[in-house]
């Protein structure tokens, strides 16, 4: 065996909770916003500051044994549906055909070039048996110590559709996806995850003048709630049961959209898994706030390390794009004016890494 050690330190701009006129408000003295971290850790009008700014790992750590080629951030994104219902407004419980896009990154950790045999299978569980609804196979030459972003079409047939939990008797159907990378027939790495096949589009309602959404071609009324990092010490961020219990409270209240607030953290995967399973949408904000990023205090030029911020944003988009619950992205909390905040690069990252959302 070997040793694996990491040194963990608090953010560089630790910040303080006292300002010239006494106790500070949203984000303390605002200094923490200079770093790429959750601004709420310096306190908010509803939260006490966390003394160590929640420094350290959260969400659990795992070690994985793989071959030389690994799959990163695999997802199946729905591009279009064919529902076989002439004259209907949108789809029903199933679609005759679904055009999907498989997106992922392949990374070769070895020095030699390899031919990667990539495969993906989409299955539905029917009466305890797995029915294949779509699959693909593709070979890719990958150079030594290199990575490649991959996008391949996958066509599925007779698929159940994902709906929010209160969509008139329809519900959040999920399928099982398996993506594998083989070298010379030997398995190098595999990822398994659940997929909700569904489309969503925003439009401006002619009567209200406000933004609205169609899901699978049907108008859906959104009733939202606010998720503001309820576990500030991040003690239960590896507890899937806790996430599901708290998401279920919102479901039972009739809510079908949760906004993940930009002053906090992007939650761990079990939160989005639970939301997808229970039929709740998620509106995900990036980690900025008008309180600390220029509108009322702080600076439009923060965080100081833009490269680190955008790298974190790209990683987050790639991690979350696979979840059916994810409805749309927001630049942050109460940002203004548009020409200054959020950075245009955030939009570019979303359009590149999560096309169509």
Image: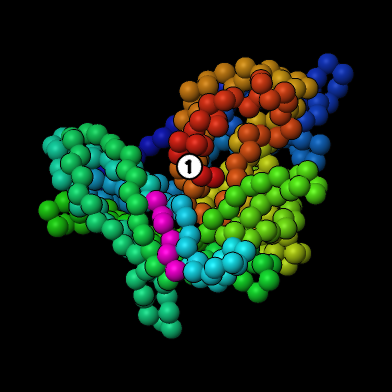
User: Are there few (<14), some (14-19), or many (20+) residues within 10 Å of tag 1?
Assistant: few
**Residue 29 in view in this figure:** no
Q: Nearer the viewer, residue 340 or 227?
A: 340
Residue 170 position within the rendered picture, expressed as x and y whole percent measured from the top left: 62, 71
Residue 243 position within the rendered picture, expressed as x and y whole percent measured from the top left: 61, 58
Position of residue 72 relative to residue 27, above or below, is below
Which residue is disc 1 drawn over? Answer: 355
Q: Is residue 158 left or right of residue 253?
A: left
Position of residue 321 relative to residue 23, above or below, is below
**Magenta residue check for 215:** no
Q: Residue furthest bottom?
A: 127
Label 1 element class: loop
Q: Residue furthest right?
A: 21
In percent of the image, x 66 and y 34: which residue is there? 332
Q: Nearer the viewer, residue 9 or 169?
A: 169
Residue 234 position within the rendered picture, expressed as x and y whole percent measured from the top left: 61, 46
Colour theme: rainbow
């Amino acid at each position: 065996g070997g040793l694996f050690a990491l040194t963990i330190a608090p953010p560089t701009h630790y910040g303080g909770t006292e300002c010239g006129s006494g106790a500070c408000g949203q984000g303390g003295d605002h200094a923490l916003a200079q770093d790429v971290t959750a601004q709420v850790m310096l306190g908010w009008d509803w939260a006490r500051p966390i003394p160590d700014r929640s420094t350290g790992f959260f969400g659990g750590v795992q070690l994985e044994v793989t071959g030389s080629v690994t799959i990163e951030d695999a997802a199946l994104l729905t591009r279009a549906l064919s529902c076989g219902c002439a004259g209907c407004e949108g789809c029903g419980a199933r679609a005759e055909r679904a055009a999907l896009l498989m997106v992922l990154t392949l990374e070769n950790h070895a020095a030699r070039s390899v031919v990667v045999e990539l495969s993906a299978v989409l299955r539905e569980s029917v009466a305890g048996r797995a029915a294949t609804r779509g699959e693909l196979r593709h070979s890719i030459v990958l150079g030594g110590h290199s990575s490649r972003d991959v996008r391949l079409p996958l066509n599925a047939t007779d698929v159940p559709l994902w709906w929010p939990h209160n969509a008139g008797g329809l519900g959040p159907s999920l399928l099982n996806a398996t993506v594998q990378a083989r070298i010379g027939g030997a398995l190098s790495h595999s990822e398994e995850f659940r997929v909700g096949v569904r489309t969503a589009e925003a439009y401006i309602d002619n009567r209200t003048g406000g933004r609205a959404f169609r899901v699978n071609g049907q108008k859906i009324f959104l009733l939202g709630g606010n998720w503001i990092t309820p576990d500030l010490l991040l003690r239960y961020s590896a507890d899937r049961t806790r996430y599901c219990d708290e998401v279920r409270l919102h479901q039972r209240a009739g809510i079908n959209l949760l906004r993940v607030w930009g002053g906090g953290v992007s939650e761990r995967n079990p939160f989005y898994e639970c939301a997808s399973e229970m039929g709740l949408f998620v509106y995900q904000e990036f980690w900025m706030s008008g309180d600390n990023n220029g509108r009322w205090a702080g600076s439009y030029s923060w965080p100081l390390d833009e490269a680190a911020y955008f790298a974190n944003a790209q990683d987050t988009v790639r991690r979350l794009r696979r979840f059916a619950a994810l409805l749309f992205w927001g630049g942050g909390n109460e940002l203004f004016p548009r020409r200054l905040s959020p950075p245009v690069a955030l939009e570019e990252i979303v359009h590149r890494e999560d096309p169509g959302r």
